[in-house]
Amino acid sequence: MAPLPLSAVDHMWTANMAGPLQFVVEFDAVLEPGRLVAAYIETAREFAGADAALVQLDEHTLALDVDDPRPEIRSTTGDPGAPLSECVDPVQIGVGNVAARGRVVSRGDRTAVGLSMSHGLADGYGLFFFLAAWAARARGARFLSPRCDRTVLTRPQARERDRVDPDALRRAGFVTVAAGAVLPELGVRTGVMDLAAFEEQARDSELTVSNLLAASLFRDYAAIAEAERITLACPVDIRRHVPELGPTYFGNGFLQMLLEVETGWVRASTVSEIAARVRDEIAMVPGRIDEAVAELEVFLQVHGVAGLDRVWGYPPDSGFLVSDVSRIPASWLDFGAGPPVAQVTPSRRPRQHGCYLLPDPERDHSLHWVSTLDHEPARHS
């Protein structure tokens, strides 16, 4: 079997900008480690690339070496009082490294399950899709089978062009920075947010909870931003807009919306006004999927794999990311003992401001957040 080339979208998330996607859940039960390890190995074989290392085919192309499976999963015993964030084995970014790692930790009368996944392998939805399939196997059930055809998000004919259009690249959700740019590492805070106020506001408008959350967080960022213009980045899942992808696509099935506006406007506007701009910008993403993927192919042709270190998902000195996967059902995370009783998102110190919104399996109408803001996100009206 030949190596599985990454899609044009996958390539853009393989370099140092994107650290691994990581998630740990804990169950108030003793689960059989051998069963979970075996279930992981079977799941990784089905999710093409999850048990493979990243390889370079040529100066323009990265791939997953699916012909040499290397499922990385280990079972350990841990101190029940140790931080849950330690129950994960982070994947390393770069060629030669396996794209996913699992871990099962027996912690007294509890069991923790951790997963670390290269962003070049899949997006946040893909991480939870894999977790769901792993959980189903662990409890003796079956989950939806993944689609792993990454050629859907390639446009090789676009490689005939010899110049990258910066505006088109930005519409595709990416910017470039100077080679060797040094950026500070930011701290992160975590917490739980009650969605009641946002849900009530959404019911009385044409806005969604996601629109309002992104707008509220962007306004929090504007309050501390020093640049005259700032950019909001929101990943937009395109699985629903590309029939060949569909809801079971495993890979990076999203493009980013980049909304650049004056900082003063964000500070002076209501959350609803900002959310309306966010909604309108997101609505334009499905119409430019082909153009976006083509521009990424041009970038790979012109700059090659070596140029990926200069690719960023938004301006690192004046941008803010809101990534929302909080609508993932808690039932997806049942490894045989019901929903988890605790969870954590181990994270390296990022070099860009942002906030990640994650499912809260313990309660309805709330979510977990992981943010670089030095305060709890506000409940703006």
Image (cartoon, rainbow, N blue to C red):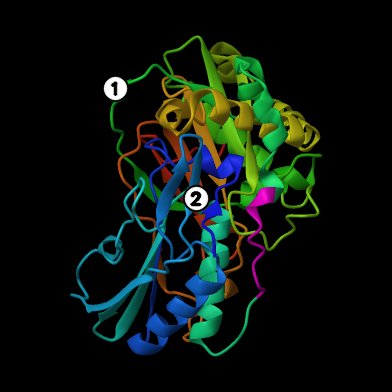
Is disc 1 surrounded by few (<14), some (14 to 19) or many (20+) residues within 10 Å? few
Q: Looking at numbered disc 2 in the image, what kind of residue is underneath it?
A: Ala
Whether residue 209 can be seen here? no
Q: Main secondary structure of the magenta part?
A: loop
Residue linked to disc 1: 182
Residue linked to disc 2: 63
Q: Nearer the viewer, residue 39 or 263?
A: 39
Are dots 2 and 1 in contact, CB under 8 Å?
A: no
- The image shows residue 15 at horizontal and vertical percentages of 41, 38
- The image shows residue 323 at horizontal and vertical percentages of 55, 43
- The image shows residue 115 at horizontal and vertical percentages of 40, 64
Q: If the image is split into quadrants, where does the C terminus sit?
A: top right
The magenta-colored residue range is: 144-151
Whether residue 77 can be seen here? yes
186 relative to 40, above or below? above
Q: Looking at numbered disc 1 in the image, what kind of residue is underneath it?
A: Val
273 relative to 344, above or below? above
- At a point 37% along the width and 37% down the height, the residue shown is 16
123 relative to 279, above or below? below
- At a point 59% along the width and 41% down the height, the residue shown is 9
Q: Nearer the viewer, residue 36 or 38?
A: 38
Is disc 2 surrounded by few (<14), some (14 to 19) or many (20+) residues within 10 Å? many
Q: Nearer the viewer, residue 165 or 29?
A: 165
